[in-house]
């Protein structure tokens, strides 16, 4: 997939930061985009795999700076990744201050029956896409740049055997974050990860409204805070890791779950 675009008319000025959000149309990604846009003028590239309407909606809700756009690209393919790099070079004037990776592949299978092609797909989306995106965009990350992977607590603690596909891939992602932080530290770029706990309305797409209500009720009852966060409550944590204040946090996986894993 060759990227054909127009080079941004003006280089992004210091007042306008630039951000690539891979998975920026998802539940968490769109909340992070909105938070970044609220905080400071941010020219954004929102990357997604297939849902054009969701991506357009996320960008519309992000108060993104002029020059922002959505890009349909599968980051598990070389063509998709070079489309992202091409768009970053042209539309973000070859500077990526923030790279947020919030793409995910989630499926539940009993561990002993998990199809291995599903496992490979999980690794592709949940880990390889992240590593490859950094490799591709590294030349565009300036000193002070920030990379943030959005993950989940299944990569930190074992839930149940059906979480093998996502949990083991997330654990690999967490280790990749540390190695990539090491690789980029001297260039002044920080690489971190937030491992989120359960979120209010989680599973809204997979469950019927009645099932969802039951599911949420059980999760709330089991949570030490007796409530679950919304994505809007979690987005400022992501924004913090993208900020200059996070300079001395590097290579870390920070659990953001209100004590769920305690
Ligand atoms: N939501 C939760 O309740 C929750 C709880 C804990 C942790 N988390 C973590 O938060 C992160 C984001 O989850 P989410 O709920 O926001 O996921 P989501 O709503 O399913 O969104 C996933 C995003 O990734 C994009 N994407 C998927 N595969 C891609 C690919 N190959 N190339 C490019 N883009 C791709 C999707 O685009 P399309 O939609 O167009 O395919 C979408 O924008 C994940 O790491 C997840 O584990 C979420």
Image (tube, rainbow, N blue to C red):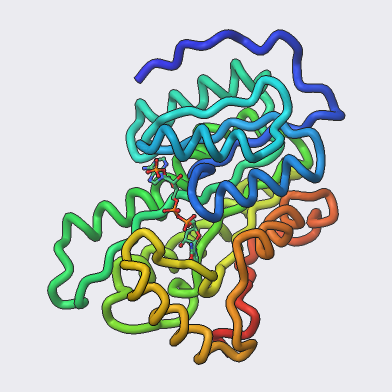
Does residue 259 appear to the left or right of 168 in the view shown?
Answer: right
Q: Quadrant of the N terminus?
A: top left
Residue 24: image location, x then y, percent:
53, 43
Q: For the image shown, how many numbered marks are present on the structure? A: 0
Residue sitting farthest toward the front: 210
Picture residue at 51% right of the left edge, 51% below the top:
102
Task: Report the residue at 60% width, 82% height from top.
Answer: 227
Tell me which residue sits at (64%, 32%) in the image: 44
Above/below status of 229 relative to 160: above
Q: Is residue 91 left or right of residue 205?
A: right
Tell me if residue 255 can be seen: no
If the image is split into quadrants, where does the C terminus sit? bottom right
- Residues 237 and 77: in front is 237
- Does residue 65 appear in the picture of this structure? yes
Residue 148 in the image: state x and y as whole percent: 62, 52
Q: Quadrant of residue 95?
A: top right
Q: Is residue 49 above or below residue 112?
A: above
In the picture shown, does residue 202 fall above or below 160?
A: above
In percent of the image, x 57 and y 51: which residue is there?
180
Q: In the image, residue 117 lies at what x, y percent?
A: 17, 55
Residue in the foreground of this view, choosing between 170 and 51:
51
Where is 32 relative to 145, above or below? Answer: below
- Most foreground residue, 18 or 227: 227
Query: Residue 144 sits in which quadrant?
Result: top right
Residue 57 falls left or right of residue 75: right
Give percent across and percent down for residue 254: 64, 70
């Amino acid at each position: 997939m060759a990227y054909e675009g127009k080079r941004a008319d003006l280089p992004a000025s210091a007042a306008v930061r630039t951000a690539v959000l891979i998975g920026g149309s998802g539940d968490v990604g769109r909340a992070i985009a909105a938070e970044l846009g609220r905080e400071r003028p941010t020219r954004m590239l929102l990357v997604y795999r297939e849902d054009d309407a969701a991506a357009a909606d996320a960008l519309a809700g992000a108060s993104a700076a002029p020059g922002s756009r959505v890009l349909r690209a599968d980051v598990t393919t070389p063509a998709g990744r070079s489309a992202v790099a091409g768009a970053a070079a042209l539309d973000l004037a070859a500077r990526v201050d923030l790279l947020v990776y919030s793409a995910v592949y989630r499926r539940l299978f009993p561990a002993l029956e998990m199809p291995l092609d599903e496992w490979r797909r999980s690794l592709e989306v949940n880990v390889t896409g992240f590593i490859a995106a950094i490799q591709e965009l590294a030349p565009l990350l300036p000193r002070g740049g920030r990379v943030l992977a959005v993950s989940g607590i299944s990569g930190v603690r074992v839930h149940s055997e059906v979480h093998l596909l996502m949990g083991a891939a997330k654990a690999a992602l967490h280790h990749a974050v540390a190695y990539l932080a090491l690789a980029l530290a001297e260039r002044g770029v920080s690489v971190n990860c937030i491992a989120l706990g359960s979120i209010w309305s989680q599973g809204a797409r997979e469950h019927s409204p009645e099932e969802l209500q039951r599911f949420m009720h059980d999760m709330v009852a089991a949570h030490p805070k007796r409530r679950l966060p919304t994505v809007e409550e979690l987005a400022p944590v992501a924004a913090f890791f993208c900020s200059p204040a996070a300079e001395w946090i590097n290579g870390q996986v920070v659990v953001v779950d209100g004590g769920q894993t305690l």
